Amino acid sequence: MDKNRFRFDGKSFIICIILFLVELVIAKTSGFIRHTFGDFLVVILLYYFVKSFINTEPKKIAIGVLCFSFLVEILQYFKIVEILGVQDNKLMRIVIGSTFSFGDLIAYTLGIITVYFIETYRVKTA
């Protein structure tokens, strides 16, 4: 394994922290902002979290985050919180989610497309 694959990227981590704080504010809202825009932003947050520690191509991070997000959403379809017995744990229900939605899959996809194009454009202009 390449010894330069793991490193700390402070800029990406700061973006991740800012997005996390935005997500906390969004969690206090309801409707479109929470259920759609929050899902759109969460994959961008995850992208920058991974990018904070792993030095690889934006495409690889984007695909990995999107696959992870889809997996979590599919697990929601199969009621993973009930299978794990954590349905009464509010934090776990928020982190894992408890309701499957095709709209979430669309929001994740649009979020990843957005961050991928931002990162690709940024790399080309740097």
Image (cartoon, helix red, strand yellow):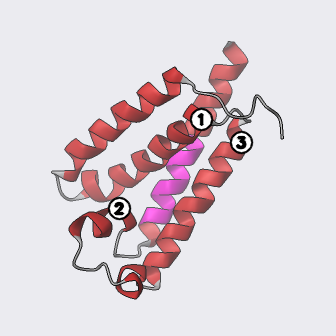
Q: Amino acid at mark 1?
A: Phe
Q: In the rendering, which numbered label is found on residue 53? A: 1
Q: Residue at x 35, y 69 (%)?
A: 97
Residue 86 image-quadrant placement: bottom left
Label 3: element kind:
helix
**90 with respect to 7 (left or right):** left
Label 1: element kind:
helix
Specify the segment rendered in magenta. Answer: 104-114
Say which label, 2 or 1, has the lower sequence index.
1
Residue 16 % position (x, y) = 43, 34
Q: Amino acid at mark 3?
A: Lys
Residue 30 % position (x, y) = 18, 57
Q: In the rendering, which numbered label is found on residue 59? A: 3
- CB within 8 Å, label 3 to label 2: no
Looking at this view, is 93 or 85 the one in front? 85
Determine if the magenta segment contains residue 110.
yes
Say which label, 3 or 2, has the lower sequence index.
3
Q: Residues within 10 Å of mark 2 (few under 14, many from 20)?
A: few
- Dominant SS of magenta comes to helix
Residue 77 % position (x, y) = 45, 81
Distance from disc 3 to disc 1, alpha carbons, whole Å, reads: 15 Å
Say which label, 3 or 1, has the lower sequence index.
1
Figure check: 125 above or below 75: above
Q: Would you name the residue on which mark 2 appears?
A: 95
**112 with respect to 61 (left or right):** left
Distance from disc 2 to disc 1, alpha carbons, whole Å, reads: 21 Å
